[in-house]
């Protein structure tokens, strides 16, 4: 059975009330959704909040999944919408907090890794991930989403265009513009180091 067929079987079982099928469906995608959230928000707490909102939205709307596209595409469309909503709320809250008080700097929360992994390897991985998150945070949300979907979710430009309701050429333009910005930012930071 292919992954797509397995997803369809799990969806059918979940719609028929199987908690096991729902749990298996969530477990299949939770790390990808969390990592998407982490790269888009740059904050582990926000990434967990986004993941919770995504799966709550999927649960509430699972009966609306028609099977026209892959389940993962549908799920990441929901994740995309929730990320955009979260970004809007955060911007609004930031503007409101600036009006009422001074900004406070929030640091990165780091989740401990698997104890079986080498600490030095895990530290390098965390540092690399934090650099990627900081670089991505410098991009506008529309470009950050395209980079996320193309690189980290391995979607095609056609799938990205459908998901974001833009043309395929616009998806490509946003992606390559974002890559150029990331390269320029990384080069500037390297020169300043």
Image: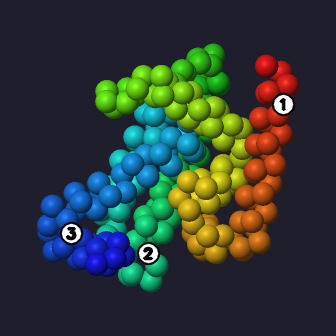
Q: Is residue 192 visible?
A: yes
Residue to which mark 2 is pinned: 70
Quarter of the rendering occupied by the C terminus: top right
Vertical placement of residue 99 versus 166, above or below: above
Location of residue 165 (image quadrant): bottom right
Front position among marks 3 and 2: 2
Q: Residues within 10 Å of mark 2 (few under 14, many from 20)?
A: some
Quarter of the rendering occupied by the N terminus: bottom left
Q: Residue at x 64, y 75 (%)?
A: 158
Count of numbered marks? 3
Which SS class for mark 2?
Answer: loop
Location of residue 169 (image quadrant): bottom right
Q: Residues within 10 Å of mark 1 (few under 14, many from 20)?
A: few
Q: Which mark is residue 14?
A: 3
Front position among marks 1 and 3: 1
Residue to which mark 1 is pinned: 188
Q: Is residue 137 visible?
A: no
Q: Which mark is residue 90?
A: none
Q: Residue at x 50, y 41 (%)?
A: 38
Give me the C-alpha separation between circle 1 and circle 3.
50 Å
Vertical placement of residue 111 versus 167, above or below: above
Q: Which residue is nearer to you in this view: 27 or 126? A: 126
Q: Residues within 10 Å of mark 3 (few under 14, many from 20)?
A: many
Which SS class for mark 3?
Answer: helix
Give me the C-alpha separation between circle 1 and circle 2.
40 Å
Which of marks 3 and 1 precedes in the sequence?
Answer: 3
Q: Residue at x 54, y 27 (%)?
A: 124
Which of marks 2 and 3 precedes in the sequence?
Answer: 3
Location of residue 22 (image quadrant): bottom left
């Amino acid at each position: 059975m292919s992954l797509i067929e397995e997803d369809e079987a799990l969806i059918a079982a979940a719609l028929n009330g199987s908690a096991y099928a729902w749990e298996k469906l969530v477990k299949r995608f939770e790390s990808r959704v969390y990592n998407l959230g982490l790269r888009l928000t740059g904050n582990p707490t926000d990434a967990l909040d986004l993941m919770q909102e995504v799966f709550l939205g999927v649960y509430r709307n699972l009966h609306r999944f028609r099977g026209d596209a892959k389940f993962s595409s549908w799920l990441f469309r929901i994740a995309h919408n929730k990320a955009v909503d979260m970004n809007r709320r955060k911007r609004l809250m930031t503007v409101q907090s600036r009006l009422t008080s001074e900004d406070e700097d929030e640091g990165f929360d780091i989740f401990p890794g698997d104890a079986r992994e080498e600490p030095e390897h895990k530290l390098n991985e965390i540092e690399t991930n934090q650099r990627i998150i900081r670089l991505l945070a410098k991009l506008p949300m529309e470009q950050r989403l395209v980079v996320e979907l193309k690189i980290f979710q391995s979607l095609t430009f056609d799938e990205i265009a459908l998901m974001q309701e833009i043309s395929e050429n616009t998806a490509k333009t946003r992606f390559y513009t974002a890559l150029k910005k990331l390269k320029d930012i990384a080069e500037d930071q390297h020169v300043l180091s």
